[in-house]
């Protein structure tokens, strides 16, 4: 079996607005040619879909579920309650969407994502969800690949290549910085 | 008796600037055709009006009071001290209005609404106020309807319809996302 | 109809250990002779019971549901997603129960109840839960009575009597303090 | 006029349990022979007494009011709303009094006094209350004396003497520490 | 003696950039015709001026010192250590001034003013400073007037007039809101 | 291949004192008969062992690494930097071990585990670690089993049985509570 | 030996984007003619370079290492684990770089730099790193000079001159403020 | 010159009660035979001693000053303002010493040391203090040794030996844990 034939990962999120963050996970999978199925499952607006989706995910043979949610962020924990498939939570920094003037500054979250992070991690004993950092959907994607790599050895090589590429990229920048010194480097880099 | 003849809900707020957030509650009531009376009662600038308003509210037969306030946010608790009508508090993210340049970025609250949330919820034993999330005046409106629905059965149906509409709306978006995948969906949705 | 014939309130909690806090609500109802039904509904260990309980509550004609939970505290929000009955959340300060030596000091929560408070209040627009203060189950009980008093006028009188008793009790203590002065008063009171 | 003939300071607190902290202010006044009147004024259980007390305080000619409160801590701000007498707030670390086993460890506040501190300081523009540190009733007492010293010059000397005594006391301990070194000093001091 | 002949209040701040916030206090004094002397005293860049300024303030006969500072905010506490004149601290929300692009958004404080608030209030027993809310220099001005009013009765009347004006102003806005309702009011007010 | 022949999981921790928390993971594995290898790897005291352990883990064929650490908690992230094996972090509430009197109360962490939680989750893009809740080593154990169950189908059944047992256990307690009511239940349960 | 012949300080950072903050340290060294070597060492993307860099730094004879990092911020602690050269950490406020619209407002950190500050300071006993304030790379530069001044007496004089210049600069601004008063000063200064 | 002839380090603290924490630094110096002078310098009770001590320290030729303080914690920053000797701050978790019953549990700090940590690190640009973790006086001692080792090469060897001893000690414990497994190890270790 090869990992690319059918979706191995389900990506879900609580709201269509979360898709702007969650696409970070999709981009990783697309880059590594891992099929994923994407849905919106709202724990609060479509509660009956929680059990349905869990059954769907098990039937589809998903190996991992990535669940992003902001604010109270119940989605990752509630999906995990319905299935034994490992769930990776992505806490999303929610924006105050009721502010009169819809500028960027006005849409910040009241709690900087801490509300979502704690709602995802502080699950009771016996019902684990794990969390990546706030808005770090891309990291959830890479972590999912690490889980998949246990079964699909070619992913191991791709992950090692990814690590090696990162190493080289930083090294190259470091050499440039060392040569130019900080003042010149920042002028060149962020002009 | 039908719920639409006279105001069943009093909406109050600590300052006229809070009206930009509190209209979120009014919009819910207007949508569901529930009459409400709106006032500004400042716990600190018009303290003598606290008792007056409480008497007015009881005389008017209000079933719920929605009280929004930012910063120290004493209004919800102080009104609750004067009446047995249930009070729903709305913590409001206050803006630092003394900043030299009045850009959006400069108007953020120092404490992200946590000050108001705790000032509303951490009432002493015996004097309850309940709180919705920061700036969630709309949710206070829906919660007030849930309370009213105990007495006005036609509101029960409207609330159920509202839930059903939410469900269908999310489902529709989810189907679109599932079909398009995250990358295409976000491009279409947030272009 | 009188309010005392059948249970008007459902009290639920996420774990049997929460019963130590939640009995604060029961004590209020018992004092005011309001019947209540008490259950343990774990959002994570018994997810299928969420919808079941919501249907049960509507069939029973509950007017209010009081839901207590600690840590990630998904229960109040998840029950609210399944019903239009108003839900009052009680954030519970969770104890680290895996500490080697089970002294009281070792069982404190990592986040002081803030995790639960935010998980209860920061619900998305359209799905409100309201919250009392951390561990304030008694206040949830009194708030529920305020909601019930809209329909059961005799409860209004009881609540007014309760307010009046509180007033007199504080007044009496204040007079004692004024007469004795702080130093003597604290010696007498907390010997 | 001498400052010791009639009470110049009103000490109030939200609950009799706060008296254990607030006596710290009384002790300062007793030491400096400044008369004070002590009362319990609950913003939430005796709201009608807020205006009454403010009038009483103005009639009594109080120069300062010290107001201690925990949790939502509305008392200092509400008294300040009713009078032009300067109010010093004392945020009090509230204890969770509903814990099953009433050990010391179980009575910690959920928010470490931050709730009270913010509820006292974050008053809206135009309605100031000032705050000392959490539980620092003694500091409120000394600050009140600084205000009184503007009118009563003999208090200036007493405050200067107090500063001088503190200086000497620390100097003496420092000399002992310098001579003994840290290891021996702590053994001697905290055996 | 009348309060307007010579400066009764010293306003100090840790940096010239704080003047943008601290002018809020000056505006109050200018409105009420109270003379004040304004200086920059940096606890860290001009430490020798702390004692000098304290002596200057006592010699000038200042009745109150208002001290604003951001970040570590040692100024209020250090001045209070050198004098028995009451010091009102103003915690200032510091901006990260080293950010590459000097937009408003980039200049937010790391800790929202909490660092300054705690550095001002959490003084050790025996050395009190009191604090108003973050950036609330205007409130420090009004509080200083309350202290001065103990000695200058005409200020009492002005403060009462100020309270009365606030009351009327809010009442007028409330009547407009009540008449128009929230939706129309916000449209009129914030177009 | 069966999952019980050789260790599939590496459990590591930063200090021997962390073993009191981390044994929660071991207990899960012992219950489910999953072999694990336990080591102490200090990122700061044995930095050279980070790369060594990563190589060892890959050579041993570990499918998951569970890494517990308190305070700065660099261990999970540093191990993840050296390997493509998925790492589950366990933030540990650190105790102030330098307090004079070594009572339980004196050993609380300064930051309640928040320091460790953020140090584990807020990894840069490209280098993911996931985290369970503070001190929730048992949940890390169950999550590891969910990952292993992708390859070892008999674990799927065991996990489903575990879920079913939890469900039944809560249901039984709920029935007892419903029958007895809160007051009697707590008396019976926590006498 | 004079301090200007070869690099005495190594400046490292976790990512090229940190160079915008870290150049604050370089500017101090350039002003005082202290040679420094600048590199990018990512604890997570180039873990093998940690030990390498430590050896390089010791071989180069660096007297101080300044290490800046954001988010999980493991770099300062990990370098300190590999060398006995004193390491000064600079916590960097990380920006959420995955936000759809890359405005300034959208790039704020979720935790305001608190995550990085704690990850740098809360090192275990025996492995110290020290930290300056969030984004305060310039202060790290001056602190490094204080360490160097122990060996290079001419730096002592330069640091004293720097202190003296600061003093004079503040004094001059203070005199201007005192003369103009706050209202005029801010108008002149921040027009 | 050898490092052991006269005191190279000044240890100061704001109060005699801080000596219980600060002796952690002294123990390190005593172990490594580095002379130190210990004093109590209260920024608030003995402000005139700040400049005096700074002069004393420069005259004594101290190479490093370690300054511990709790609460508002102005001492480290104020000493640093008066001297160019590098200052290492130790934030100390302050205990609420005014609690009625002086049990351990009652003496916790309101802010867990965060107040002190921020007051030490968030110094303005140009006036650096560096900080170790809360209560980590021992780490301040080791860091001071790293600074001294720049001038006293024999200290380099001692620090390397210290690192090597730590490594071996952890390795030994790890081998024991690996052999026994977690369950047996914790039973043996913490019986």
Image: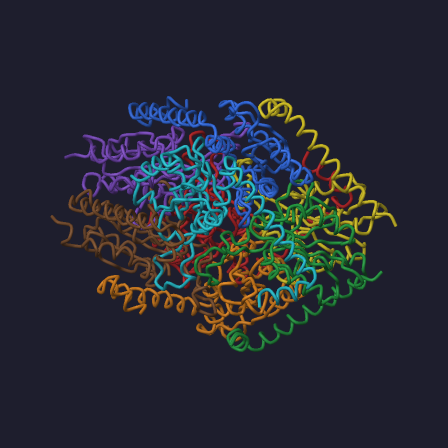
Chain colours: A red, B purple, C brown, D cyan, E blue, F orange, G yellow, H green
Percent x, y of residue G163 = 74, 39
Q: Quadrant of residue D81?
A: top left
Percent x, y of residue D38 = 38, 46
Q: Nearer the viewer, residue D29 or E30?
A: D29
Q: Quadrant of residue E100?
A: top right
Q: Image point 64% across, 74% down: which residue?
A: H172
Q: Quadrant of residue C52?
A: bottom left
Percent x, y of residue C42 = 33, 59
Q: Is residue E182 above or below residue A19?
A: above
Q: Is residue F71 above or below residue B109?
A: below
Q: Is residue H61 left or right of residue D179?
A: right
Looking at the image, which residue sits at the far right? G1
Q: Quadrant of the C terminus of chain F?
A: bottom left
Q: Is residue F23 above or below residue B147?
A: below
Looking at the image, which residue sits at the far left? C1
Q: Is residue H70 left or right of residue D115?
A: right
Q: Image point 28% across, 67% down: which residue?
A: F187
Q: Nearer the viewer, residue G5 or D62?
A: D62
Q: Image point 35% across, 36% down: which residue?
A: D54
Q: Is residue A60 left or right of residue G136?
A: left
Query: In the rendered image, is residue B176 in sight?
Result: no
Percent x, y of residue E150 = 46, 32
Query: In the rendered image, is residue F159 in sight?
Result: yes
Total numbered labels placed on residues in the image: 0
Q: Image point 74% across, 46% down: which residue?
A: H84
């Amino acid at each position: 079996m090869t990992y690319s034939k059918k979706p191995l990962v389900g990506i879900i999120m609580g709201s269509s607005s979360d898709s702007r963050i969650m696409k970070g996970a999709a981009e990783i999978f697309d880059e590594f040619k891992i099929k994923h199925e994407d849905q919106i499952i709202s724990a609060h607006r479509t509660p009956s879909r929680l059990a349905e989706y869990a059954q769907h995910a098990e039937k589809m043979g998903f190996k991992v579920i990535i669940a992003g949610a902001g604010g109270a962020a119940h989605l990752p924990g509630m999906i995990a309650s319905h299935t034994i498939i490992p769930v990776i939570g992505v806490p999303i920094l929610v924006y105050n969407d009721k502010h009169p003037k819809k500028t960027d500054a006005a849409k910040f979250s009241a709690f900087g994502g801490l509300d979502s992070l704690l709602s995802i991690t502080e699950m009771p004993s016996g019902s684990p969800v794990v969390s990546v950092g706030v808005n770090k959907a891309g990291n959830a994607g890479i972590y999912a690949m690490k889980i998949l790599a246990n079964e699909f050895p070619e992913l191991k090589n791709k992950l090692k290549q990814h690590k090696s590429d990162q190493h080289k990229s930083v090294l190259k920048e470091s050499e440039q910085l060392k040569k130019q010194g900080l003042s010149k480097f920042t002028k060149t880099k962020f002009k």
